[in-house]
Amino acid sequence: MKLSAMIKAGMAGLLALAAGVVFSAANAATINVTRCVGSLNKTLSGQTVTFWGFGTGGMMCTGALPGAAIEVGVYPAGSGMSDTLNLTLSINGMTPQENAPYNGHTIHLHGADVATAEDGVPETGAAVGGDTYTWTPTSEMAGSYLYHCHVHTVKHLEMGMYGALIARPKNTSGVFLNQLTHNTATAFDYVQNYVFGSVDPAYHTATGDSTVFADYNPVYFLISGNQGLTTSAPAMTLAAAVNKKVALRLLGLHSVNGTFAVKDGSGNAKSFTVYTQDGRELSAPQTVTSLDVSPGQRFDIVFTTPATTGTWYPQITYKNLRNGTAYTNGTVYGRVTF
Amino acid sequence: MAAWGYTEVAGTPKFPGPTLTANEGDTVNVTVVNNHNINHNFLIQGVTTDTTAIAPGGNRVYSFTASTAGSYLYYDTLNSNINREMCMYGMLWVGPADGSAKAWTNGPSYSFQRMWVVGEMDKARWNDVAGSGGTVNTSVYKPNYFLINGQGGFDGMNNTATTIDGGVGQTALVRIVNGGQFAQSLHFHGNHVQVLTINGARQSSPYKKVDVINVPPLGTADVLFVLNQLGSYPMHNHTAQMETANGVYLNGVATMIIMR
């Protein structure tokens, strides 16, 4: 263990001790989660592409794309209660990684206002051989975040080392609420995470400082690790009911522009309401029919299914950074039936 | 790498061009002298409208009244984006009439401000070709250098004119203009910023709090950064390939947030 990691472990111990005194409310939770890193192959348009995913398991890690979502509770304003997330990254001799100087991995709690020591950035002192990252979100932080590796980020993000991190409202009894924030207007009946990703297979085989990384040519486009090239073969499916509220958490891990919409089978855009951006509730919710999502951004949205049965298709069109031209096969579909 | 630039002193092009400043109500006269061998012009987006070409050896005066506090991009509009690609852009910022450290009259106060001029270059296909007098195929653009205030990576992270470096309790106003052709999705680690203006549109209080600000080509943004915790954090473009210089990591559009 590096000295910096030892000092950090000691600090975490002190913080935990303090937490036992300050947070006397019995219903606040300490959430301990461990992630390892494992290789996985995806078949995209008939081609095999290797990813590194955050997963679970011991020496033989089963990686997932994206990594499983992590939820941490946030309590009503004024309750004085907080959950504490301890997210541990476990690395061993079997962990897929690059050669030095880009060996190892970290976890960056993207969007979380944390101390430098929890930020997971090697260039500001983070250990790359495994560590525990701690976050104690407060009431106003309800919303969507990401966790991702921050070693040689140009490659490791592309390799799929990411997952959703959700600050989700709990009541003072410690029970998760089906709301985006503590504002009851954000209540939902269903919720799904739409993690946006783009794939340039050349980035998956290149390593180190390579000119490959100067020229991004994505050819596969994903929602939550899946291609959904047509409405009949969507990346995401949800069986909902009529007259119900569907919440989608839109998480931008792509490296191009993107525009999200919800359309019916005839291509008519449906209204949805944006309640949060980057883990903060908007002072005035915005009801729109399309939403640009750029790399790193997160939005939480809600739409209400109509009174008659049918199917809607939440979808994102991935676009060129220069002029917003849609990529070939750049629209990825989800499907919500009701 | 070949580049052209605006500057105050003939013979020494700057990238980005010199920062211009004024207060609301000021009359500003900018004289542009073309010492280069092709046509150029000078447009302050949202402020001036004259895009007449200045021939080699010629000059032109641009006069305007600074009317609205905020941040503006100036650039050369000619030559199918090639002149801009060759680095002919910079920032004008306008303060309130009384010269106070506020984003606008009666607007949010700041302790210090930073000017971030961002952009990128396609060295092989644009800069080298235009610099040697060749014809650029403008339909292809594959930039491989990504810059903040003319620098990438550790240079931008160590440049005290770029870093947000101050004491806890201070507030920084960060002015951002994008002179490039790629959208810039800028991520602040460990902190949220308040969005005061986006593409010239002044927002209302309470200001939206974000950790990613997307600035499109020719776009602008003003964000307020409250230094509220000790620590050091990066700010960088979250578009993966824009974190390199010709594929070498860690580079591209990046700087540091240092709170003491």
Image: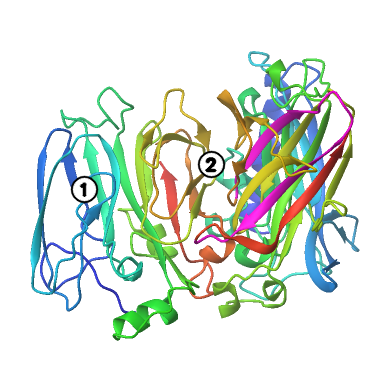
Residue type pointed to by label 2:
Asp
Q: Is residue A316 above or below residue A47?
A: above
Kindly state the secondary structure of the residue where label 1 is placed. Answer: loop
Comparing A125 with A318, the one in front is A318
Kindly state the secondary structure of the residue where label 2 is placed. Answer: loop
Of the two numbered discs 1 and 2 on the same chain, state the one appearing first in sequence.
Answer: 1
Q: Is residue A103 above or below residue A22?
A: below
In reply to whether residue A173 is colored magenta, the answer given is no
Examine the image and state in which quarter residue A182 appears: top right
Residue B106 makes an appearance in the image: yes
Tell me the distance, in whole angstroms, between the alpha carbons under discs 1 and 2. 32 Å
Residue type pointed to by label 1:
Thr
Residue A136 makes an appearance in the image: no
Image mark 1: chain: B
**Residue under circle 2?**
B211
Highlighted magenta segment, given as a residue range: A296-322
Few, some or many residues within 10 Å of mark 1 (<14, 14–19, 20+):
some
**Residue under circle 1?**
B48
